[in-house]
């Protein structure tokens, strides 16, 4: 038996055969062409074919998770007339080469030019260009890099994996995923979580693994090869226990989020699209604690109209009934962009013009969203929350816009309700100002993903920092406590809506701090509910 260790990125147990996925390394033969027009026409035909394939993949996958399936729309957009298309056509005409070779060299030139840049937006664009190039080369008669998983579900092992590849494979054929590259917060890992697939990262890959029997432990980050009979039986029992535990958790769907000593805790859901609403209701969340509205602005060619936003918010409000729905206004910028937004490139976009800063710069866009939310408030229990707030001056500007919106709706006799407002606490500046900010709003919500990376000065998606990045860092936990205390001094409720809210190892810690509510992805609602119901805050706690 051989044992290998990696980083557990999503829990679960898988028992089965390894399938080693190696992207096809192919070199396209270069030849000079005497018919440039034909090569240009072949490239255009391939471009349109691949664009339609990507749009079809979006249609097939958007019901899994529309926010992630939107990457297919991003890639289709790159195939529209633009810089990539001009570069390929320019190579064909100037060098008089075949179309497939022009695609390959254009891809390689772009990758080499930008390979040392760490900005998430650029990395994502280059990855998209690499993927569409593979599809174009396939359409032009090159070797297909696509994968065939076979007839039985497998433990997929690969150097790296993109969200698009993962969605193409399909959940039903994947027992688990193991990658060399990646992290707990990489896009493919988040997609695996959405699909409920156990996964490991940061593991050295060996070619001889292909076809071998293995056991994957997604709790400890361990991969066992050629397990002996005793270990096989143990993990079969653990796998059965996992299934039984899941069944037991389902019994908590309609139970209260109440500690053993009787304290009620708000347990809400984080959502990114209409597709999540059924899961929110199925798992019995108290409401939606974070609706990421920016996904309505991505994967499209122009701004959503006010009425389009209104109809979406109205449907959510009506679906959730009396349950509260917290709509976070568009947190655009950084790695959340679309071409039509025309957001200038920045040297450090994570620290740049994003969130409320961008919205206050684009008041026409911001007011359209605010009007849509207030119009929809007449149909349910909506609340509104603003991202990346760092000062009272920003709240002054927001309140001025809200007054204008309300006056405009009242003048036209459009019904609306007064909405509870909140802000995201995502920066050390907001933590230090949290008492002053709490006086101005009804609730505070800790976005621990950004708060951790800004506090530690570490990009949470930087692979070089994954062993140093510590979201349990004492400084982060002290900041959570500071915000809770500051909020309560001003009679302001405090919620946690980042990844840490779903970390059951911290549930009791947060409840003892006095956190009023937690908001997590729908799949984590029941484990967190179980942790809440097993906590007794009346007992003395020894740290």
Image (cartoon, grey):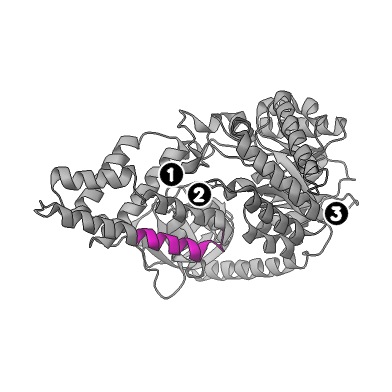
Quarter of the image with the C terminus is top right
CA separation in Å, label 2 and label 1? 10 Å
Disc 2 designates what residue?
A: 187
- Mark 2 Cα-neighbour bin, 10 Å: few <14, some 14–19, many ≥20: some
- Judge from the rendering whether residue 23 lies leftward or rightward of residue 272; answer left or right: left
Disc 1 designates what residue?
A: 124
CA separation in Å, label 2 and label 3? 34 Å
CA separation in Å, label 3 and label 1? 42 Å
Instruction: Tell me residue 16's x, y (percent).
Output: 47, 69
Q: Which mark is first along the chain, 1 or 2?
A: 1
User: CB under 8 Å between callouts 2 and 1?
Assistant: yes
Disc 3 designates what residue?
A: 258
Task: Please name the residue shown 83% across and 49% down the image.
Answer: 265
Query: Which of 191 and 19 lies nearest the eye of the viewer?
Result: 191
Task: Please name the residue shown 64% across and 45% down the image.
Answer: 499
Q: Which mark is first along the chain, 3 or 2?
A: 2
SS state under label 2: helix
Which portion, as a residue range, is magenta?
Answer: 50-65
Assess whether residue 513 is covered by the magenta stretch: no
| Residue 2 seen in render | no
Give the overall secondary structure of the magenta segment: helix
- Mark 1 Cα-neighbour bin, 10 Å: few <14, some 14–19, many ≥20: some
- Judge from the rendering whether residue 265 lies leftward or rightward of residue 368; answer left or right: right
């Amino acid at each position: 038996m051989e044992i290998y260790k990696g980083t557990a990125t999503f829990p679960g147990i898988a028992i089965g055969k390894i399938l080693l996925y190696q992207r096809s390394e192919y070199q396209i033969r270069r030849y000079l062409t005497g018919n440039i027009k034909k090569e240009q026409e072949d490239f255009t035909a391939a471009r349109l074919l691949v664009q339609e394939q990507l749009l079809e993949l979006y249609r097939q996958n958007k019901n899994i998770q529309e926010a992630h399936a939107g990457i297919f729309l991003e890639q289709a957009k790159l195939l529209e007339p633009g810089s990539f298309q001009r570069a390929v056509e320019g190579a064909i005409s100037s060098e008089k080469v075949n179309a497939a070779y022009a695609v390959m060299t254009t891809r390689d030139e772009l990758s080499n030019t930008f390979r040392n840049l760490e900005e998430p937006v650029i990395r994502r664009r280059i990855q998209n260009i690499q993927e569409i190039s593979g599809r174009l080369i396939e359409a032009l008669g090159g070797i297909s890099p696509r994968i065939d998983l076979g007839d039985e579900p497998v433990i997929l092992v690969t150097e790296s994996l993109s969200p698009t590849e993962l969605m193409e494979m399909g959940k039903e054929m994947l027992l688990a995923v193991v990658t060399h590259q990646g992290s707990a917060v990489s896009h493919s890992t988040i997609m695996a979580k959405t699909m409920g697939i156990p996964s490991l990262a940061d593991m050295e890959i060996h070619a001889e693994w292909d076809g071998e029997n293995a056991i994957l432990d997604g709790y400890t980050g361990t991969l066992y090869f050629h397990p002996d009979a005793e270990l096989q039986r143990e993990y079969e029992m653990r796998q059965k226990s996992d299934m039984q535990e899941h069944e037991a958790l389902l019994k908590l769907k309609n139970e209260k989020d109440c500690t053993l000593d009787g304290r009620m805790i708000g347990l809400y859901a984080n959502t990114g699209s209409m597709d999540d609403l059924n899961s929110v209701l199925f798992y019995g969340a108290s409401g939606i604690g974070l609706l990421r509205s920016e996904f309505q602005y991505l994967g499209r060619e122009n701004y959503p109209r006010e009425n389009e936003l209104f109809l979406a918010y109205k449907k959510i409000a009506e679906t959730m009934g009396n349950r509260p729905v917290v709509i976070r206004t568009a947190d655009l910028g950084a790695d959340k962009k679309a071409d039509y937004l025309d957001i200038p490139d920045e040297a450090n976009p994570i620290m740049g013009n994003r969130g409320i800063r961008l919205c206050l710069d684009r008041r026409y866009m911001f007011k359209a969203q605010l009007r849509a939310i207030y119009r929809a408030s007449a149909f349910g229990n909506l609340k509104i929350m603003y991202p990346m707030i760092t000062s009272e001056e920003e709240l002054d500007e927001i309140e001025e816009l809200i007054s204008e919106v309300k006056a405009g709706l009242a003048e036209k006799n459009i019904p609306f309700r007064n909405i509870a407002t909140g802000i995201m606490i995502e920066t050390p500046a907001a933590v230090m100002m949290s008492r002053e900010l709490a006086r101005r709003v009804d609730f505070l919500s800790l976005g621990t993903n950004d708060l951790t990376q800004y506090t530690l000065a570490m990009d949470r998606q930087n692979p070089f920092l994954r062993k140093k990045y510590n979201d349990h860092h004492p400084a982060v936990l002290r900041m959570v406590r500071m915000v809770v205390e500051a909020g309560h001094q001003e009679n302001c409720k405090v919620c946690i809506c980042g990844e840490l809210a779903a970390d059951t190892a911290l549930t009791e810690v947060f409840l003892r701090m006095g956190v009023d509510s937690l908001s997590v992805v729908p799949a984590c609602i029941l484990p967190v509910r179980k942790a809440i119901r097993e906590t007794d805050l009346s007992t003395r706690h020894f740290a």
